[in-house]
Image (cartoon, grey):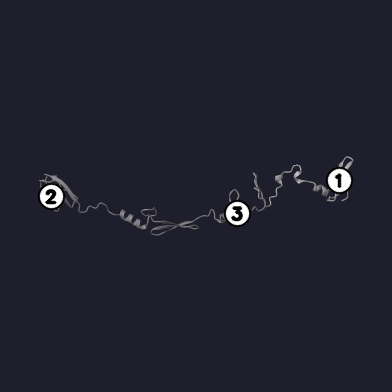
Amino acid sequence: MADTKITALADAGGATAADYLYIVDGATSKHVQFDDFEGSLAHDNLSGFVANEHIDWTNATDNFSTTGTIHSNGNITTGGTVDGVDIAGLSVFVTANTLKDTNVDTDLSVTKNATTMTVVSSDGDNAVLVEADTTNAGILGSDKWDEIVANSTKTTYVKTNVKGHIAHGATAATARPSGFTSVEWVGSVEPTNASNGDTWIDTT
């Protein structure tokens, strides 16, 4: 593009490095070639320059610190930790957690034998309940149940060959106690109501 005054630059088309930039001051004008002008600009010296807005983080070793939110539409990778957490190592646990079944209904049933009960789970581990012993709590086995039933049905206080005792003193006609196979009499006279098998202890 040939030399063009700035007033006509809008219609002159795109500028190239070989074109000139005119600076007009009243009737006086000066010009500088674009490639010389661009080369003389120092980015860091421009007005409004903020150093932290122009950091090349490629292979950076400095710490990145912010109180704001980090947004990324791509993949963030790290060979270290984030707040002390090994992010790369967490992937194994994330995968395992994703594969687990949650909120799954479980059907329970019970199988039994003489000494154990097994709680059967439709989708988990079974639990075996064992018989109680003198040390540990547990279920009541069938053999112990039979012993309890046998003890509950027994007849208690059966009076068999029980010997009675009575001190009749000097009264020979004292009545004989009932319900005894034999009676032991204690007195100074012979009891007149004694039965066969009774004994008399003479205290005279």
Residue 19 placement (x, y as % from top left):
85, 49
Q: CA distance from mark 3 to mark 1?
A: 59 Å
Residue indicated by mark 2: 200
Residue 168 placement (x, y as % from top left):
14, 45
Q: Nearer the viewer, mark 3 or mark 1?
A: 1
N-term mark: 3 or 2: 3
Going by the picture, which residue comes out furthest to the right? 27
Identified at 15% across, 49% down, the residue is 184
Q: Nearer the viewer, mark 3 or mark 2?
A: 3
Residue indicated by mark 3: 88
Residue indicated by mark 1: 31
Q: CA distance from mark 3 to mark 2?
A: 104 Å
Residue 71 placement (x, y as % from top left):
66, 48
Relative to 3, 106 lies left or right: left
The answer to whether residue 143 is above or below residue 203 is below
Nearest the viewer among 36 and 12 is 36
Q: Residues within 10 Å of mark 3 (few under 14, many from 20)?
A: few
Relative to 187, 144 lies left or right: right
Q: Disc 3 marks which amino acid?
A: Ala
Relative to 40, 105 lies left or right: left
N-term mark: 3 or 1: 1
Res. 183 visible in picture = yes
Q: Disc 2 marks which amino acid?
A: Trp
